[in-house]
Image: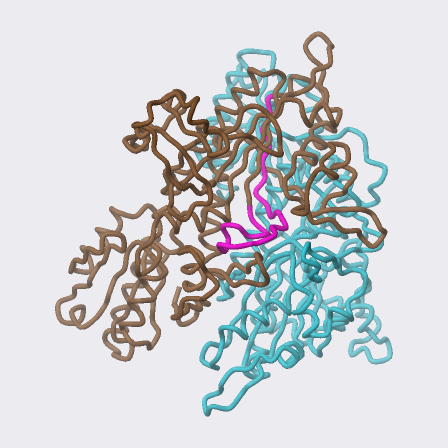
Chain colours: A brown, B cyan
Amino acid sequence: MRLSQYFLPTLKETPSEAQIASHRLMLRAGMINQTTSGIYTWLPLGLKVLQKIENIVAEEQNRIGCHRVLMPTLQPASLWQESGRYEAYGKEMLRFKDRHDREMLYSPTNEEVITDIVRQYVKSYRALPQILYQIGWKFRDEIRPRFGVMRGREFFMKDGYSFDIDYEGAKASYEKIFQSYLTTFRRLGLTAIPVQADSGAIGGNLSHEFQIVAPTGESTIYYDEDYDQLSDQDMTLERLRNMYAAADEKHDPFQCPIPQERLKTARGIEVGHIFYFGTKYSKAMNLTVQGPKGELIIPEMGSYGIGVSRLVGAIIEASHDDNGIIWPDSVTPFHVGLISAKADDAQVEAAATALYQQLATRGFDVLYDDRSERIGVKFADMDLIGLPWQIVVGNKTIEHNTVELKNRRTGERQDLSIEACLTYLQKHIDV
Amino acid sequence: MRLSQYFLPTLKETPSEAQIASHRLMLRAGMINQTTSGIYTWLPLGLKVLQKIENIVAEEQNRIGCHRVLMPTLQPASLWQESGRYEAYGKEMLRFKDRHDREMLYSPTNEEVITDIVRQYVKSYRALPQILYQIGWKFRDEIRPRFGVMRGREFFMKDGYSFDIDYEGAKASYEKIFQSYLTTFRRLGLTAIPVQADSGAIGGNLSHEFQIVAPTGESTIYYDEDYDQLSDQDMTLERLRNMYAAADEKHDPFQCPIPQERLKTARGIEVGHIFYFGTKYSKAMNLTVQGPKGELIIPEMGSYGIGVSRLVGAIIEASHDDNGIIWPDSVTPFHVGLISAKADDAQVEAAATALYQQLATRGFDVLYDDRSERIGVKFADMDLIGLPWQIVVGNKTIEHNTVELKNRRTGERQDLSIEACLTYLQKHIDV
């Protein structure tokens, strides 16, 4: 993509309304634009990241045999009256009437709709277990939206729902998702700690939140210091089963099973939440299936969420420096940023354009800064938007056929011949 | 995908509420489920098709240099008051107040939000032309939703917006999109006729609807019989420029430039609509850019829509038979349907499973009907869901190492060795 033709409105000033790094950087990097309080338009750069995260989340769900559906944002109140939540839910739920005066709502979550679907089609225990998920937009009318996409009102979320014929099945589904979430977050370049949690409004007795440690987190979490020693490969359900980690509302200092000196406290950003809640919805909504002997079984359910739009902010909170964002390879909007150091010099411009073509031929997604801006502006913008690799084409390219390759995370720079640079990138980037 | 583990709730009975083929077939093929009037949940098979269409539409937009954004579904009334449409729009617009009593709406279209974005960032003529698009969910509170996803209330649409500094530029953008739409619809396996149209509520003076000829269409269109002779390759802007085609509201028999005997009348399904509307929104919302001499220019705009969820229905209307859907290759939810004719026979089952693996290795996306259902049920379901190729593994596979390959569109069947079948499919399917 040639930057001169792209839509990347970076800002030099720090927007005054943004209190945390991710919000500031997303606004400055031209990723989002606030349409109204807690509601954003995703600009091209932001949307690319959002879609990459969406794809990784979907791939990991599909890998473990979940099936993707898409439920509507607007739903009839009647379904929510069946579960009892239409009255119970607070002002976060947006309620309204349609032109025929029917009560409706904008979905904040989807236990009712998915239970309604399963009860219409699933009649036999043979069709279970089943895990259905969607990735879609939801709305919660937060009283004080803040932190950009981290606590917005309209947000993009993966929500999944498991249906099993008994507790053992439900527990197996829960653990399958638990393990899959560890993989998902790892692929996103994040270390997420699964902490025991009260399941709050949704109700139930088995629940974990997945928390990213970050000073700007809204939750307090308590966890065994051993977590900090775990390699990514060690983050397995088996390994974690006996390690302590709890959310604030669940942690009781007098009941804590590990000694005080091993207990760490940190701020966390919740990026996932899983619940087992038994027959709460299936019972209320009359979902039954026939068992092997013709008996009626009320399926056991769980629900599983990942905050996809929130993750964009969470990843930035976990990975940035004073100059801007540092994208993990898996979600970077472009693989490489290419800078023409002298856009007005025909030779440099020609060399940069030739390299742009060569990179494209090798399958790299490249953002080519071909603008006639000062080089300082180009460097600052490139650092700000956080692509993992930057290539500078300049006088040296003309004189010695070399380019400068910079690693955004380490800051390390090397002069390489064009061929060596291409070879290096092919070794370091998965396209 | 093994059908025994999938979520594909096909229906034997024809749902009584469905009046047209696509609505009936989408319900029967387990593609959608009605959540409430005019509002649907997309089940796994339907969602796969919807996403394939979305991807093709996005690819063709990106190819011509449009940039993808995503605007929120909920928008503040204030923006729509600036354009004057908040009052002008009828009951199709869903209006409500949030918890702070602020007036909001569920977006039926996005001229206001996109103009607001461009006016915030684009200050110079140098940043134009620019075409921004999104593919997102919209809501129009139709008084009588019907025909399934063809006239639903919550629907998925591509909407794009062009910004140019003068009429010539705007016309060039319009023609670029026009040509791109022809390619898009052709890739979807459709022949869309661009008919001159009044631009109705949106206002303006240059407008085309893209219509698929189908007996169940809601519009009447008039067109030169030469259209029926055009090959796909001949459907270019240059060629069409002088051929007559008009929507009902635009066609005037007394002004028609072609002789009566060459004029054809047909029913059409509108799948795309493009408008040029000049400075209507840019003027109302104070969007200006600085010209080369420092003068203020009010950009000229156009908007361009494709009904993505509607297209699922339109494609089925254009491509089905008495037994079910017949998917064009480009949007089929799976490339191949594999049927084990005797699921209870261990040898047949093993042969089918082995072939399933071989097909997967070659990159084919296969739906493998491994259920212990009667063979008649399997054949009927496979015809219903409309995958282009069906392979039957049965006794002959065990005895002669052959399978039956059926072309869903022509009905043609051939017995082929497994190797020959794989080779044949590799030649006929783009993976």
Number of marks drawn: 0
Residue at the spot x=66%, y=20% of the render? Answer: A299
Can you give x and y, in whole percent of width and height, for residue B218 in the image? Answer: 81, 57
Q: Residue furthest front?
A: A254
Can you give x and y, in whole percent of width and height, for residue B389 in the image? Answer: 59, 35
Give whichever of B193, A289 is nearer the camera: A289
Residue A213 left/right relative to B209: left
Residue at the spot x=48%, y=54% of the render? Answer: A147
- As for residue B63 lying within the magenta part, the answer is no
Q: Quadrant of residue A77?
A: top right
Residue B138 left/right relative to A388: right
Residues in magenta, as a range? A129-156
Residue at the spot x=58%, y=60% of the render? Answer: A37
Residue B320 appears in view: yes
Can you give x and y, in whole percent of width and height, for residue B241 in the image? Answer: 65, 75
Can you give x and y, in whole percent of width and height, for residue A214 in the image? Answer: 38, 45
Residue B325 left/right relative to B357: right
Q: Quadrant of residue B307?
A: bottom right
Give whichever of A71, A255 is nearer the camera: A255
Residue B404 appears in view: no
- As for residue A148 lying within the magenta part, the answer is yes
Residue A187 left/right relative to B323: left
Quick one: quadrant of the N terminus of chain A?
bottom left
